[in-house]
Amino acid sequence: MTVDTSPEARLEPPRQTSLGTAAARNLATTTKSAPQMQEITSRWLLRMLPWVETKGGAYRVNRRLTYTVGDGRIEFVQDGAHVRVIPRELGEIAMLRGFDDVEVLTALAGRCVQRDFRPGEVLVERGSPAGEIHLIAHGRINQTAVGKYGDEVAVGVLADGDRFGDHALLDGAGTWDYTATAATAGTLLTLSRADFDAVLSSAPHLHAHVQRFGSLPHQRQNKHGEAEIAVSAGHSGEPELPGTFVDYELNPREYELSIAQTVLRVHTRVADLYNEPMNQTEEQLRLTVEALRERQEHELINNREFGLLHNAAFKQRIQTHSGPPTPDDLDELLCRRRGSKLFLAHPRTIAAIGREFNARGLYPDHVDLGGQQVPAWRGVPILPCNKIPISKENTSSILVMRTGEDNQGVIGLHQTGLPEEYEPGLSVRFMGIDERSIISYLVTTYFSAAILVPDALGVLENVQIARRND
């Protein structure tokens, strides 16, 4: 047999002997999936929040009258390595709450002395005289004391914006009842009692304000700062019973419904000709609603007006003891409130929780939520939420909450019965067809969230989630 080895013969493609797949597909019906979307998450927060009907577009949270003063965090201004406190922020100190003389506050701010500290440095020693207040601009500080049986116990962890030593400015004989040790490097500002007295002696308005603060009716508060309800118990005979009434806040907070909207556009040619085997308009609308719900959950976490991270009470924000999320940290979150319903954390944070549990030989329980097994601690499910931010330093937050109106917890707010409602609280309105044959639909949802009492929501802040090099 003779084989043609010429260059022309070597370049000739092999002859086709059967029908090709490209041509065959023209006569075949393919099996298709619905349009897929990576953005869709489990959205546990939307599923777990009890949603309360909010007619009129606003929800008012009525509470008992509370005398709470100066429980906010203090903010600073940084100019290179120099840090100074914003004068008006000194109003967050209990005895200066409501004092608005900017000139005097500026004089006090000017007497605050900056102090940079190193990890392990002892800032105040238990039993030593307390003669100054410390304002933490940056860093983490551990407070320890001696327990009942002589061992050292942790009292608290302070971080950016916190302070300690409020009593030192008025109590000349006060001493520190704990030791404060720097856990990280950082900076604080110190205002001594001598400097405070110097400003106090030259400012009659400040002197009068401090005197009024000292005469506040502290005996009429309960441990939560609420106006006390006088009650008598354990008496005998016919003593005169105390009279009382339940006082309310005069200016309760109102939560207005927020909005998330978008305009969906579909060409009439697509809607008319390409609706088999799937309705193009319905698929476009389905994916748009998914994106809108994802945005809704993001706002419920991060919105500065009503988002949970920004509205958690300062007294309900705690710091980790060592950085990573340990079982002890989760226990401290739980012990600050009754009836905790769920933990909420970024998936990477949940992975860090698992590493800390494994390092201690602990294995979280699992609970059933709607037929799905999820990890839990002390019977409280730990649910993922990728809307919780992670900082550049690989730190995040863990939320824990009690939910429901009956439990004085966290609730979601929405309004149903909207015109052209597509889902509860979400409407799709036809906006017409323009001159380019584009059909437009307005997709809208109204929502918000409310924290009925401060201890309904707790936040564990500055949780280190990066893996340590052991």
Image: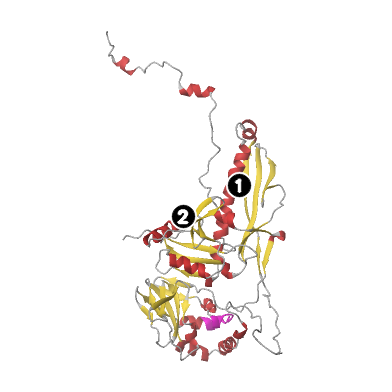
Quadrant occupied by the N terminus? top left
Q: Any mark on residue 347, and which? A: 2
Is residue 354 inside the magenta stretch?
no
- Locate residue 164, reporting x and y percent: 46, 79
Number of residue marks:
2
Q: Which residues are magenta?
A: 94-105
The residue depicted at 67 percent of the width and 51 percent of the height is: 424
Give above or below for 269 relative to 309: above
- Locate residue 65, reporting x and y percent: 65, 77
The residue depicted at 40 percent of the width and 70 percent of the height is: 80
Q: Secondary structure at mark 2?
A: helix
- Pick whichever of labels 1 and 2 is earlier in the sequence: 1
- Locate residue 82, reporting x and y percent: 41, 74
Q: Nearer the viewer, mark 1 or mark 2?
A: 2
Way the structure is coloured: secondary structure
The quadrant where residue 242 appears: bottom right
| Residue sitting nearer the eye, 282 or 460 | 460
Residue picked out by circle 1: 289
Is residue 99 inside the magenta stretch?
yes
Give above or below for 364 relative to 319: above
Q: Residue furthest top?
A: 1
Give above or below for 14 relative to 341: above
The residue depicted at 57 percent of the width and 60 percent of the height is: 303
